[in-house]
Image (spheres, helix red, strand yellow):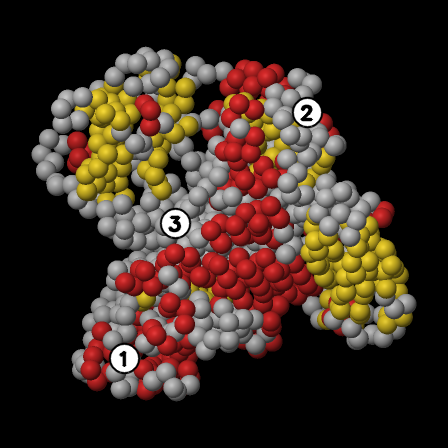
Amino acid sequence: MNKHFLVGVITLGVILQGLTACSKSAAPNANKPDANQPQDTAASTASYPFRDASLSVDARVDDLVSRLTTTEKIAQMFNDTPAIERLGIPAYNWWNESLHGVARAGKATVYPQAIGLAATFDEDLMLRVATSISDEGRAKYHDFLSKDVRTIYGGLTFWSPNINIFRDPRWGRGQETYGEDPFLTGRMAINFVKGIQGENDNSDYLKAVATIKHYAVHSGPEKTRHSDDYHPTRKDLFETYLPAFRMAIAETNVQSLMCAYNRVDGAPACGNNELMQEILRGDMGFNGYVVSDCGAIADFYESRSHHVVDSPAEAAAWAVKSGTDLNCGDSHGNTYTNLHYALQQGLITEDYIDIAVKRLFKARIKLGMFDEQDRVPYSEIGMDVVGSPKHLALTQEAAEKSIVLLKNNGVLPLKAGVKVAVIGPNAIDEDVLVGNYHGVPVKPVLPLEGIVNRVGEANVFYAPGSSQIADIYSHYEPISAENFYHEDANGNLAAGLKAEYYADYYSAAEINDDTFSATPALNRIDADINFSWPVSPIDNSLDDEFSAVWTGILKPKKSGSYRFSGTVALAINGKPVNGAVNLKAGESYNIKAIFGVQKWWPVNAIHPYGKFTWLDESRDLEEEALAAARKADVIIFMGGIDAHLEGEEMPLELDGFTHGDRTHINLPKVQTNLLKQLKATGKPVVMVNFSGSAMALNWESEKLDAILQAFYPGEATGTALANILWGDVSPSGRLPVTFYKGVDDLPAFNDYHMENRTYKFYRGEPLYAFGHGLGYVDFAYNNLVVANTVEAGKALPIAVSVTNTGKMQAEDVAQVYISLLDAPANTPIRDLKAFKRTKLAAGESTELEFNLPASALTYIDDNGKTQTYTGRVEVTVGSGQKGYVKENAIAVATINVQ
């Protein structure tokens, strides 16, 4: 959603984070015992076999499920499962997020968005990042348990990573993925899963559960994801859409998988027998549990969605029989409550329900949830790991490795003592740090802040210059604390606003009514209104509703015509505000701002944001920017977009953006127009582009002096950027997606055929190729050692020498591509088969070795079958793809497979 809602309208509510809200409704009578239910006691359950940690997991699960009534079993198949008090089994909510840090549960280390992590091409880094995320997840889980908090975003089952293929740059959720290549996606997923689950810890317990999603053939459009039916070719299905899932399942013990909203060849993904049974359970050998995307089972029967059945009972039976064990609820409650009716109608037998419930309890037992905590080593992880110096250093390392230098005419790195103009709408926008699915950063460093920290305030001239998008998406800014006052007990003006927090939701109309008499649960002074509340400010709970009322005095520092926005209902001098208001500098205006979060707007589905922002219509942003530019030696433009424009199913329609997706991939015109004026000053212009997707930076690439693609780099953004801009670190990120010159020569967005998509099949000339990335030094590749002739079905050993030819230490990503020169015409142009990061001192050389498995010399035929290849093969190893790097930055050989 537009982060400022409608310009000039003060809105009471919450900012949607690109997520369809799901209610927490449970089954009717879900906790009500059957008439013949055994009357166990807490004491008697202690000796039950399911409590015996010395038994096998399967034996414990069998015992536990055998003791449950049908009603109890069904209730355990909801994402918010109730307690079974007679057996001492606590309630549990399966929904948690950890895409690039523990999300939506308060402060946590925020790493680069997933697409940025992919740009590192660093498997070891990904493992360390995921390990740190699971450390923080474990710490928060035990902290919540100590407070008896068992709600959403408090558990150990994380619905990450997103391993869909970013096949089209228009997809808003592509930022959550590891890019367009199945092999890169698979390798990053493997290390993420291992780190989250603690698979290298030699423990009998799971540290946490990772969930690979969204299975399968899912990558937009967002607007129609609940009704679309995709028909990939068999070749595309097995060559592009399934390999990352296959790799993660084969090389990890991943415990969970989420099925997607869309249909595939007529059947909803969560009820597609071929995908779920024949391929997933059979061919791939997946033995974990499957959770639906939220509301996906309701899509089976809803008329506005797939409507492939007529009733919730039919939908529930179909999904469970297909292997969807857990249903994330929907706006009508939870479709699986209708499993009672499905049983009565003979649509399903209880055996299917038993299978699903056993899979779910197996995961909880592996997590140690029914054992004494001193047996579970991870229970000792404390809250001191959250945002620890080690983790903050790691997120800075990740940010530095994720930033891609697209172009450089020699202006970078900047010289010491240079004066810079920092201009652009993203220079002080915290949203560009975090992307979507994120926590609250512990120590966020904004782009401008990082530069000021690096060179000093006297050497930096800042101006926003423009909004991200003209007119509707204007440059609103938080109202700073220096403008707010209140009267203290002695009648004197003091800084800040009086804040009253209520433990219930009240509308603005209720609070403004003369009869309103509720007692605040919390009174305090707030310096300003600029909050993100993943937990209630009253009691630190994850799911409490609350209201807030701020009163005091607004004293603007500058006269002007102001428009207000944000998420508060505002009155000035007792009158509701709608439209522009003329304010005079130094005058006092009595204000009252009201904010509320309702229980049915659950904090469990979205973040409530208390924001109070304004727009000074009298400012000339362009002239401010040009004035700053004239004072500087170099202009650094912080532009692009953020996750309020691209993301998940957002009710947003703007030029270039629709429902979270994009209709074109150009930089917004208002920014390009400003860049043209800045370039006309004659000063060097360095652009830092923030986006989770490819941008068609055509004019910018031709005219600007340097361009950095930052993606959404996490909470260390400012520090990482400054280190790269001034040459403390040589940029080493590589593009995990192709940057096209536009979308006109791409297939339609909803066309899932892979022809002319991604580097593997695109026949045009990209703006920047997959794998592209410059540095401040060059790396030379030579002495490629590979056999001239290889036997079909055998592995392929490769060795190559690489040298840092520059004058500073730097890192490069060696990329190994295979081209099957005699394969059918629709075989990929080239395929990434291996990659390896290497760090070398100036002038240092090393030898890299790769051992490609026999599968690297196979291809997928039109029937989706894997075929062993014979014929000529071109092997390249270097800093990028052949034709897109300098001649000495790649080594090439042609061999024969017989």
Q: How many marks overall?
A: 3
Q: Is residue 54 left or right of residue 507?
A: right
Distance between mark 2 and mark 3 Cα atoms: 38 Å
Distance between mark 1 and mark 3 Cα atoms: 40 Å
Q: Quadrant of residue 496?
A: top left
Q: Quadrant of residue 836?
A: bottom right
Q: Which mark is residue 33?
A: none
Q: Assess disc 3: are there few (<14), some (14-19) or many (≥20) residues with their C-alpha within 10 Å of its C-alpha.
A: many
Q: Is residue 538 above or below residue 333?
A: above
- Amino acid type at circle 2 is Pro
Q: Is residue 724 left or right of residue 533?
A: right
Q: Can you say which quadrant of the picture contains the N terminus? A: top left
Which is nearer the N-term, disc 1 or disc 3? Answer: 1
Q: Which mark is residue 69?
A: 1
Q: Can you say which quadrant of the picture contains the C terminus? A: bottom right
Q: Secondary structure at mark 1?
A: loop
Assess whether mark 2 and mark 1 are in contact (beta carbons under 8 angstroms). no
Q: Is residue 160 above or below residue 204?
A: above
Assess whether mark 3 and mark 1 are in contact (beta carbons under 8 angstroms). no
